Image (cartoon, rainbow, N blue to C red):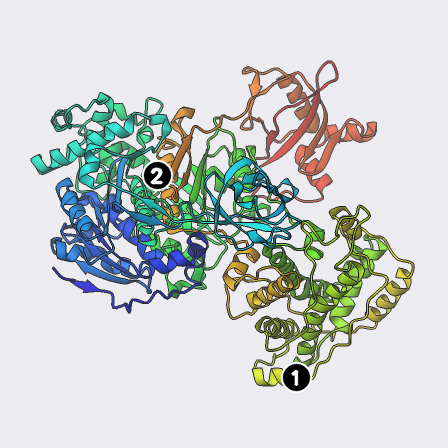
Amino acid sequence: MGINSENGMADNGDAVFDKNLYSRQIYALGESAMMHLRKASVLISGIGSVGVEVAKNLILGGIRQVTIHDTRDARWLDLSAQYYLKESDIGRNRAEASFEHLAELNDSVTCHLSMDPLNENFVKQFDLTVLTDAPLSMQLIVNDWTRKHNRHFIATDARGLFGIVFVDVGAEFKVNDLNGERCKELLIEHVDAETGDVTTLDNVMHGLEDGDYVTFSEVKGMTELNGIEPLKITIKKPNVFNIGKVVAKFSPYVEGGRFTQVKVPSIISHKSLKESLIEPDILMWDFAKFENPSQLHALWQALHSFEAKHKRSPMPRSNEDVGLLKVELPPGAELDENLLRIFSYQACGNLAPIASIVGGIAAQEAMKAVMHHMTPLKQFLYIDCIEALPGDWSPFDNNNLTANDCEMKNCRYDGQVAVFGRAYQEALLKQKYFIVGAGAIGCELLKNLAMMGVACGPDGKLKITDMDQIEISNLNRQFLFRRNDVGNKKSEVAVKAVKDFNLNIKIDALSERVGAETESIFTDDFFNDLNGVLNALDNVDARRYMDRRCIYYRLPLLDSGTMGTKGNTQVVYPHLTESYGSSVDPPEKDIPICTLKNFPNEIQHTIQWARDLFEGLFTTPAETANQFISDERGFLQRVDQMNTAQRLHMLSKVEEALIRERPHSPEDCIKWARMNFQEYFHNMIAQLLHMFPPDQVTEQGIKFWSGSKRCPHVLDFNPDEPEHFNFVWAASILRAHQYGITPIIDKKKFLAVLNEIHPPPFMPKSDVKIAVTEAEAKQEEKATADDDVDEKLQSVMMNLAKLNKKTTKSLIPIDFEKDDDTNHHMEFITAASNLRADNYQITPADVMKTKQIAGRIIPALATTTAAVAGLVCIELYKMIGDGHQPPNVPLKVFKNGFLNLALPFFGFSEPIAAPKKKVGFKCADGYFTLWDRFEIQGPKKMKELIQWIKEETGLDVTMMSCGVSLIYSFFLSSDKRMERLEQDMKDIVEEVTRKKIPDYVQSIVLEVIANNKDDEDVEIPYIKFNLR
């Protein structure tokens, strides 16, 4: 057996990789795991719906060499989920038809094509073999081959709303890191020599678990702990862990130190497929269906027996085939008859969302097998999403379907019709959805929607918006994009690409941000024409905005997100569930100001300091100076609202940027950069040590430089030190760009200029205040003027008045861009952070780690994204009705999902119902929720609206507002109140807000405070006032 074709990519066996391309994946897996991927070879056999997903994810993931294999030809049933097959490919080998599409996904992966039957000599070449939709007999044979040659094996398949993954990594498989989480590292407050208890500083929770291992460093007194071999711990309290009696004979603990978690390799043992069929280890998919996995274990075996005997799959809605399948059940199997019937009915089903879920999970398991990183699945996973079948609440009740309804007619949707029926398919074609975001999740959603046929009929429509352009780092998981798309708009490229999957899809691309500023684009008409919204966003503010929009327009919203191997989905459904904004995650803990400014103790502190320094040197001064140049009068009016000290600070920065420190040559830029090195890494540290010497003791007799305060040391500039040079080099280039000056980039010339710069010696200042606590730091920010501030302010104002605004050139603000290695942004921030780390004896960070923290980059994997997008579309199946309004789906049908593919773990829960508020006014239900409101048709005068509210609720309106504007109040003067009562509502709003209501706005929101007969405030829903 040989290779029939390959993509011609170089395959030299090296483990090199493009860090820009794989950056988000490296943050999720680590460089060591990435190196393993770049050395691995994988065979994927069976390029149906699941096989193409596995192949896509592994090629995107950077497996060194991937071989695509199949002996089957494409059928109509494949087209509902295999997106690289077209109608013209029917009768053509599936691997051959898909090969070019897969091979172009990643130009750093060598792809081979094979169409010959598998044999042992061929299979043994690969580190891992993945079989998809293969007969059980073939799975058993191939698994024997892989075990014989110490190779790894995965078998996976999907039918209808069911899926299966089986993993065998062998009898003795080493895992270097079971969970893939970043190692914990914290400061220590005390080590008890008698008990072995270790307490964290400031009672911070250590986040460790029993059986974890730790090492120690920087411990004073008990120095024997420093560099000790990893010690196994037991947990005592959230802030205390125990390391045993090892410390009993050590020197007494004095102070300080930090612990670092260490990942110790574990050995995993798997059974063969043959053994596992008899004694299965099954991971739970959904704890609400606790009985299903063991039954599905029997059903999948029965299905393989049925297909081997009858040379076909059970037919949709065939009760005869249900009986024949039951005969094939393993001896002693006990089954729920309804599950047996559903499973048999769906054996011909082929759904893109299920393939996306199964393919994402299986591909992550494949990565684990070749990386020796994260816990392999043990060993079966049986996926079922049968709650997606429409019930009696739907016009497409699955229980009423007949064989005729599900008949396959050589149509691209046959695999989906087999599950849901043709009427349901027709409804999918008419759907109108808005996808917000065309990144990783957005691409996966588009792929699934195209395969499902959503908006693929004449009455359907999809709209997708994304303001971003494609970057190199996107290509690793946003699979609709290629290298030649870099720089183009994501939404436009995604729309063009997805039309290749299904030519009938009706879809428009937009590139606007969703927010209050674009409501002239995303208007009432825009939202009123939709069936629902799919969020594919990576920021909370946009999610909350879309959440509010969907509540207002009473639209279903499906939200999802990923972070590395973790993912989540949430259903927001009108009149049924809580909203995305109903529960809020706790905000990220900010680094205290005093820690950032003077007392860093972690690399995260120095990186944030460097990021702020970048903003303070290259962005904010230029923006502020440009505001002054373009609109001096308006700028000074705004400054006059500040206190005197703030005015001096603001205007001094403008004077500094435009006059006092304005460079006129590249040599000036180099001098400025060198002087900044001296200021930040020598003088400021020297001043700090002048005020707080290393042996300083507090009034309580405690060493000042102890606990979280690390005593720093000054840095003397040395151009031969890489970070010293890099800081001045990058800073000078950025400074030159800021002022439109051509920088000196010849390093010989640069050094010649640099060596002539001699900063003056440090002289301590007596008038400097340094904040030691967070309270002092905040007070310092609010500080009022010194005695001579008026004189200084006058001098600055005079200098700025002399400036000729017409001839003064504007500056170029430099906005931080983390993913361009040629712009010197990360070079500057990395150097600045590591120099400050050197000041404080903190372990430095490389560019990759610095980029992640400075850029707040979220780790991401194609595998997790595929699985999450599949789960979203499973929930979408439940929302399909036969009209514009969503059906009345029972709450128990929906599932919010959470997964962690590293463990692996899957958890599902019923969405939380919309909280009900008891009403204090006339109301039929006696309560209202966030989905309720009063709706009234204009035009109306204020008095008519107030009277209407009185009649509806029995309440008296005391105040009314529109947005931030108060338009009616009991404390208005009598004359003004009477005037308002006679005015038209639209006129009042325009008068008070001083803005004309645009024509595209069809309604406004009014908030009302009303009192009952006892003069008590009563909460009522908002009012939607329809203008037209």
Comparing labels 2 and 1, the label whose residue is closer to the camera: 1
Question: Alpha-carbon distance for marks 2 and 1?
Answer: 69 Å
Horizontal placement of 863 versus 973: left or right?
A: left
Q: Can residue 956 be seen in the rendering of this structure? A: yes
Residue at the (49%, 46%) spot, across then down: 231
704 horizontally vs 244: left or right = right
Could you tell me residue 795's position as x and y percent?
87, 68
In which quadrant is the C terminus drawn? top right
Check the image and report above or below for 546 versus 401: below
Seen as rendered, the residue at the extreme front is: 249
Where does the image place residue 1003, in percent across and percent down from the top left?
A: 58, 36
Q: Are marks 2 and 1 in contact (CB under 8 Å)?
A: no
**For the residue labelled by badge 1, is the local secondary structure a helix, a strand or a loop?**
helix
Query: Based on the displayed image, in which of its 4 quarters is residue 917 positioned?
Result: top right
Depth order, front residue of 834/1009? 834
Which quadrant does the N terminus fall into? bottom left
* Mark 2 lies on residue: 430
**Neighbourhood count class around disc 1 (C-alpha, 10 Å): few under 14, some 14–19, many 20 upward:** some
Quarter of image, res 992: top right
Q: Which amino acid type is marked by label 1? A: Val
Q: Give the residue at mark 1.
A: 753
In this rendering, the answer to whether 474 lies above or below 917 is below
For the point 32% across and 32% down, the residue is: 385
Q: Residue at x 43, y 28 (%)?
A: 910
Amino acid type at image mark 2: Lys
